[in-house]
Amino acid sequence: MTTEDVLEEFRAAGALKEGHFVLSSGLHSPVFLQKNLVFMDASRTERLCKALAAKIIAAVGPVDVAISPAVGGIIPGYETARHLGVPSMYVEREGGAFKLRRGFSVEPGQRVVMVEDIVTTGLSSRECIAAIQEAGGEVVAAACIVDRSGGRADVGVPLIALATLDVPAYPADALPPELAAIPTTDPGSRRLSK
């Protein structure tokens, strides 16, 4: 599956939005990928995650488990794990930090792929990977449906993206005039308090 194939799935779901958006990272962007409109369609999600699973196997070989950050990564993490034939788990925030909860655990040295929905800065991915490593898992790669950093996000392990886009994102105090002229639209994503 190519980047254009992935974008076509987002377009078909009405999930490729243009305007002025504040991302969960706090950065501003003229493009928003409303992934939940994609993930509400089981067939579309299956196509994307099956392709991501194949890309993971081709890059790092078999893994033992897939772990995702809650909440956004749970659906693609589960569906990708299903196609990898491995258990799916997720980390949740507890006291501001990601942790495995709900009886989830990894065995020391288990080969883990961290599966995310969309990567912009890599912050959530890095936090998720740190929690997995603290729990004893060996994170062999991170994977996502879309890397919107153009390949620049550093998550600390190899990042396998089904689609890579170079979508601009700006701090609030450095908006280009054409973006500053457009009122912000609340896409319904989580806001960081940073």
Image (cartoon, rainbow, N blue to C red):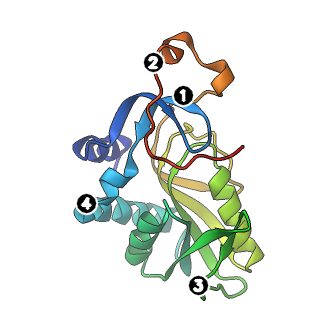
Amino acid identity at mark 4: Asp
Q: Which mark is residue 182?
A: 2
Residue 112: where, in percent of width, then height? 61, 74
Using the rendered view, name the quadrant where residue 187 is placed. top left
| Image position of 21 with respect to 49: above or below | above
Q: Earlier in the sequence, mark 3 or mark 1?
A: 3
The residue at which mark 3 appears reads as 102
Marks 1/4: CA–CA distance: 28 Å
Labels 3 and 2 touching (C-beta < 8 A): no
Residue 163: where, in percent of width, then height? 43, 46
The residue at which mark 4 appears reads as 41
Q: Earlier in the sequence, mark 2 or mark 1?
A: 1
Marks 2/1: CA–CA distance: 15 Å
Amino acid identity at mark 2: Ile
The residue at which mark 1 appears reads as 168
Q: Residue at x 41, y 42 (%)?
A: 33
User: Considering the numbered disc 2 on the image, is that residue within a helix, a strand or a loop?
Assistant: loop
Q: Earlier in the sequence, mark 3 or mark 2?
A: 3
Which mark is in front, 2 or 4? Answer: 2
Amino acid identity at mark 3: Arg
Q: Earlier in the sequence, mark 3 or mark 4?
A: 4
Badge 1: residue crowd in 10 Å (few <14, some 14–19, many ≥20): some
Q: Which mark is residue 21?
A: none
Work out whether residue 63 can be spotted: no
Q: Earlier in the sequence, mark 2 or mark 4?
A: 4
Marks 3/1: CA–CA distance: 37 Å
